[in-house]
Each structure stands twice: as structure tokens, then as C-alpha cells.
Image (spheres, coloured by chain):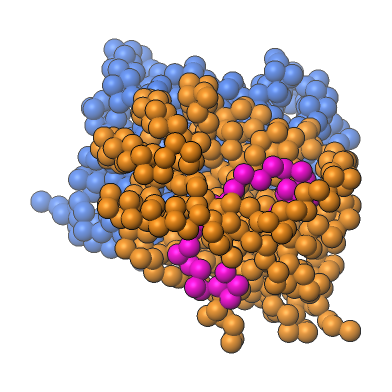
Chain colours: A orange, B blue
Amino acid sequence: MPDCTIQSISTYDARFALPPGAGTDSIHATSEYCLAMTLLSTQDRQRGSGFVLTLGDGNTLVCKAIEMLAKPLEGMCIEAVMADFGNISRKIADHAALRWLGPHKGVVQLALASITNACFDLWAKSRGVPLWKLLLNLAPEELVRVLDLSYLEEILSKEKALSMLNEQLPSRAQREAILKGGYPGYDTSVGWMDYDDEKVTELTKKALSQGFSAFKLKVGSREESRDLRRAAMLRSLVGEESTLMFDANQHWHLPDALRICSELAKFRPHWIEEPTHPDDIQAHVELSRALSPIKIAAGEHIANRVLFKNFMRAEALSFVQVDCTRVGGVSEFLTISFLAKLFDLPVVPHVGDMGQLHQHLVLFNHIGLGLKVEFLEHIPHLRSHFIHPAQVKDGVYHTPQEPGASADLKVLCES
Amino acid sequence: MPDCTIQSISTYDARFALPPGAGTDSIHATSEYCLAMTLLSTQDRQRGSGFVLTLGDGNTLVCKAIEMLAKPLEGMCIEAVMADFGNISRKIADHAALRWLGPHKGVVQLALASITNACFDLWAKSRGVPLWKLLLNLAPEELVRVLDLSYLEEILSKEKALSMLNEQLPSRAQREAILKGGYPGYDTSVGWMDYDDEKVTELTKKALSQGFSAFKLKVGSREESRDLRRAAMLRSLVGEESTLMFDANQHWHLPDALRICSELAKFRPHWIEEPTHPDDIQAHVELSRALSPIKIAAGEHIANRVLFKNFMRAEALSFVQVDCTRVGGVSEFLTISFLAKLFDLPVVPHVGDMGQLHQHLVLFNHIGLGLKVEFLEHIPHLRSHFIHPAQVKDGVYHTPQEPGASADLKVLCES
């Protein structure tokens, strides 16, 4: 009988240079994507890989925090960990000393996410199934036990979460068609800030020919006229039938956001993303009201379920871009998906994981929780570094079949 | 002529064991207070000391982040740094890689605070005056230039901040009486969670005899009856004329907070502090409405000016407990004080600095900004470690006279 006891916990500071201009936006002059990785090894030589995205030297801090926070998992069987993960992850998050540094945000939250994601990967591998299948195979009671619902009690009790899952059971089968047909990706990598117009044009044409029909453009240039010119160019390139999104990466203050977004509205974006500071709920509310019917998307930098609850209650966002490498990992991603279901909002993850884990979570959200699938962001720059890169063909995400969460890096495969 | 160029930047990881039970509350089983220190040394042998409070191993992470973030200050003259500190601190906060880890919260924000506080200490020392006097001596234009007002533009422009300072100039002299008379402290250290009833009684009697008339009790016990019993005990001990505050340190979820706070209201607290999760603005709004006239205090874990703006706009708090060792340092503390003035709310800092820096800031807020002074928290456990500990006599904070921000530690005085 295999021994799933977690024998050792280590970290790996993975850094990958990006092609020139890739990853750039109005705020981040990114030249490398980094993954702060948690590696769990069991007695029976299984390995759990979890990670969060950071940029550059931030990775050092997150790796150090992982080492500090993950210790309680040593010597525990992964099945025992996951049978009570809601409580165990809460204890990790509420570390007597390190909670002070958040709580539930910043470096310590990123560390929790990396640890959590490694636990889910290991759990799925130890059962020999892909993460999406593991989650769908869990009884509703088991699924709810992986969630930490604290500070949501007034709207999402355990009983409520359980009934939400049970309600969806009868109609699950009809939603399983997605496992065969897949679902669309949308292409962020056509429109990075530092790409010149020629490059955006070339990449957009290529993506169109590959079957993509939804595209994102980075906005928030120093010269507003550049944003408007490029928005017009992209709309003209992709035609009226395609979907456009604009992403300002928090660049504008509220008065600028109100002015520029109403200009950008002419190009009929599906959403405007991160128009201002991610902590400014009230500014998001005012933008949502002023720009209607244009909708606001946010979540890439919203750190936890409590903040998401506040955004949703205030009607500050229309698309929930929760990222399991920003909030406390797969578990809190699911919790926030329950909240989105309660508020009847679509979940369209930001893919700090490059779509590797989120491709699983989108499937669970649709089949298990009854959330509509719109599409999933696709960023290809790190594809070649994964053992099992997401299969996006003809603009469509296809269902991963390998056991685990598709998080293993090639560079670690021989170690 | 002295050369105020910053020649070297280093960190010091200071850790101090606390007496048994001191520092404990419903969430933090603290056994040591740690200060993540930034040390700036100039050519002419001046030293700037800045710090933030953390608990235990969190200090390692903050010290590491300080090293990463402080580099741009090397080789700059402190006068040049402070003449444009609003822009310079914004650039530090928006570090191309490390901003991702926040933004403006968690470990990177604590690091910014430590760096900022060292800059203000060095600036005041280089001019040979206490921090409060430095701030009062600045022309309104100079003061506004140390502030980063980004993401507040819709309510607090530079022009608005300037006019707020100018408005107060004619009435300054009458408020300067506080420099002679001092202002009251309130005593948090009588009521730590792990102190038994006998200890609370003994310490409260001692504090009463020392002239204190305001006291804080930690609540959020596992058994609610303990909170109510101790609240009754403390009210009985100090009499109806004294001021009581209850502090739950984020322990309750909203339904519990509503129930228990309405029980605690019987003991006429001046405020109930951190009743629930510090990110839950809407829960604070509901509590404020339900408990009126009992008021809510919060801020110890509110990380930046954008979040404070949201709390204030939503009427989610009645006492602003901003802490210059939680937000981005002295500069952002001042910015948030401007916001408080706009919203007509009292600023009663949480003293992660043990009252060393905040004693200066309270004086500036009162004289320069026209904010009423209620009192300032007093926590004595680290007094003996400072070269110039705050002078609290007969329950009153007396005006510090030494140059700088009173942040130097004895352990570093020979190095």
C-alpha cells in the first residue's frame, strides 16, 4: 500500500526571461516571470508541485515565507491534510507570528497559495486523476471541508455551500459535454504595452488565423491618444464580431479613469480591466455606474475572499478575475467561485498560473457549481517549461488528462 | 559644511522577549515584539533609524524587503530626498518587480514604512530638531511635497492639502499650548488577553494611581462569558468617569460581532476596536450602524491610504487608528490624517512604534492640521530599549525634545 506521508517540503525559485516586450503593461515593466514553487515529496515518491507567479526578486521573499509556513504539513498524510483542509489552511494562514504581515494578503498569502496548490496537485496525483476530476469526484461534504469559509458566515455558511453543490448534482451530466468540446481561450499576448503597432497587428492576425476570437489590449499609456489609436486599430483588425477587452493594470486615478474609459467605450469592449487601484472599491463602484453598459473586470490583485465579498456586495465588478496564485490557492479560488455563484457573476480567472491550474478549475466551476464558462485567458510565454502545457488548439482549451494540476516544470523532472 | 549624503543603508533585525502574557490577544499569541529596522548613515556620521513592528520570524522577511527596496536612496542627500519625497516614495512603492507582491500592503508596505521612517528621522536629526518641530517648521508647500496623494485625487488634490494647511496657520499659536502641557496616554497593557483577573486588577489599580484614566481590555475570548465578566470587572474597578475601550483584534465574524458587541455595549465602551476582519469594510459599516451610539475603531491592520479612504467614505469607522509602522510610514500617516480631517474623524494611532514616533505625529496633527487630540495609546514593554523613551508621566505624554523621531535603540548606540 502506498505511503502518502509528506516526507519533505522544499521550495524552488524558478525564473524565466520573457521575449522582448512580452508581459509589459502600464505598471509592470516585466522582463521575467517567476514562479515561487512549493515541492512536497511523499514516502512513496509522489511529488506535489504548487506555485504562484511573481516578478523578479519578489520570488525570494515568497520562497522564504513558504519555508516558514509549510512546516506543519511535514509528516502528515496528504489524505489527512485534505480531509480537513479548510481548518488546516486556516491555521497556516493564521500563523502566530506571520499573520501580522497580512493578514491574508501580500507575501504570506502568496506563500499560502503556493503551499495549497502543491497540496491539491499531490492529492490529485496520489489518486491518479487530473485535478478537475478529483474535485468533481469529491462528495459535496468532502468538497466543503477543503474550504475556509471564515468571515463569510453572514452569506456563505457550510450548509449553504453544501446546498449549492447538491442543487447542481442533477444537471451535472448535461454540463459534462464541455469535457469533450473544450472551451475558448482568449489571447492576452497580442497586445502587450511595449509591442509596437506592427507587432500587435502581426500577432492579432496570427491569433485570428489560429481560431481565437477574443483579444486583450493593454491600455494606460502615458499618452492617452496612443490608447485610443490602438483600440481603434485592434477593433478594425478583428472586426465587429470579435471580442475586445482593455486592461489598464491599475494605472488611472478615478477622474482619469472616468474620462478615458468613456472614450474607450466607443470601441465596445467586453470589459475594462483594473481601471484603478485594486483596493479602491468605491472607485470601482463609481466607474461601474458611470460606464454602464460597459463592464468592469477585476481580481488579479484582490487578495482574499473577504475583499471579493466586499467587491461583490458593493456591485463594484462585473467579471470576477480571481487568480489561484494570488488568493490563498485552489481552495480559496473555489470559495470565491461560490461567492460569484451567489451573486450571479461570471468567474473569468486571471492566469498567474499561465492557465495550467485554472483550466481544471474552470471545468469544476462549470460542471460542479453550474457557473457559465465564457472563456479563459491564454498566455503562452512559459508553455515550453511545463511537462504538460495546457493544450490550446484552434483557440480552444482542451481537457487535461494527466494526473495532478499540470504544475510540474521540466527543469525539476529529473531531480 | 556637513555632508548629508546617504553613504550606506543597512537593516537590523531587533527582537525583544515580552514578559509572560504581555502582548497577547484573541488572535496573536505574541511572545516577542520585533522591529525591522532601516539604518541610514551619512558622510557626516548622522544616522537615521526607522522601524516597523512585526512578530517573530516576520522580521526576517521585512528586513530582506528593505534591502531590496531602499537601494535608490544610496548616494542621495537627505535634503534632496525629502524635497521630493512624495514622488520618491511612490517610486520605491512601485518597484518594477516588488509592487506585484502588494501593491501597497503586506511585507513590501512594511518595508517602505521602515525606510520612510528612517528618512524622516535622519532629516530631523540633520536639522537638529525633533520630528514634530521639523514638520511644523516646513512651509505648507514643503509639507505637501512629502506626501504621495496618488489615487486620492477625487477628494484630496495637492491644492486641497495646501489649502487645508494654510487654513490652520492663523490658529496655530493657540494650539501650541499642548507642547507645554502634553496630552493624555491610555493604557493598553492592563488588559492583555492572557493576564488573569488578578493581574488585570493589580495593573489597573497601579495605572489609576499613576494618573491614567483610559484603559483597554482585550476581548474575543473563546468563552464569551469571560469577555463580559472582565468588562464588568474593569468598569467596576475604574468607575463610571474613566474611559474603557474593548479590542477584539479581528476575532469575530459578523454575526458574532453583532451579538457580542451589543452585550459589551452595556459597559459603555468609548469604542470597540477591530471587531472583525480588517478587510471587511461592509461588515464594519453594518456594525457601526447596529451599535450606534457605540463607535467602531480600526486601522491597526489597514494597509494604505486607499483603503482608509474607502473606510471613511463608507462610514465604516469612527476612530482612525492609522499606524505609521503599518501604512507606508510617517508620510502616508500624514496623508491619512489629511483624509481624517476631511471626514471630521479623530486620529488615535495604534502604536506599533510603542508611541515613539506617534508622539511627534499627534503634535503635528493637532497644531499643524487642527485635529483634536483625544489621547495616545501607551504600551511600555520596550521602553528600556530606546535611547529616548517616550516620557509618559502622571498618565500624560510630554513633548520630546531630542532631535529626530525618538527611534534609536540602545543596542545600536555604540555601533
Q: Of residues A99 and B399, which is closer to you in this image?
A: A99
Left or right of A160 in this view: B301: left
Q: Is residue A403 above or below residue B286?
A: below
Q: Quadrant of the C terminus of chain B?
A: bottom left
Q: Position of residue A241 (x, y in %)?
A: 48, 38
Q: Is residue B279 left or right of residue A29?
A: right
Seen from this angle, which residue lies furthest bottom?
A414
Q: Nearer the viewer, residue B324 or B411?
A: B324
Q: Which residues are magenta?
A: A363-390
Image quadrant where residue B219 sits: top right
Residue B153 can be seen in this image: no
Asked if B77 appears above or below B138 in the picture, the reply is below
* In magenta segment, residue A44: no
Q: Residue at x 86, y 32 (%)?
A: B229
Q: Is residue B58 left or right of residue B43?
A: right
- Residue drawn 40% across and 57% down? A206
Name the residue at the left extreme: B1
Which of A103/B323 is in front?
A103
Q: Judge whether A199 appears above or below A224 on screen.
A: below
Residue B156: x %, y % from top left: 38, 24
Residue B6 x/y as whole percent: 24, 57
Query: Which residue is at a point 74% across and 26% down the rendered structure image?
Result: B238
Looking at the image, can residue B266 be seen? yes
Looking at this view, is B122 or A311 the one in front?
A: A311
Residue A167 occupies quadrant? top right
Q: How many marks?
A: 0
Residue A68 location in percent, x, y? 62, 67
B294 left or right, relative to B176: right
Q: Based on the picture, tell me whether residue A376 belongs to the magenta stretch.
A: yes
User: Which residue occupies 24% across, 46% down?
Assistant: B81
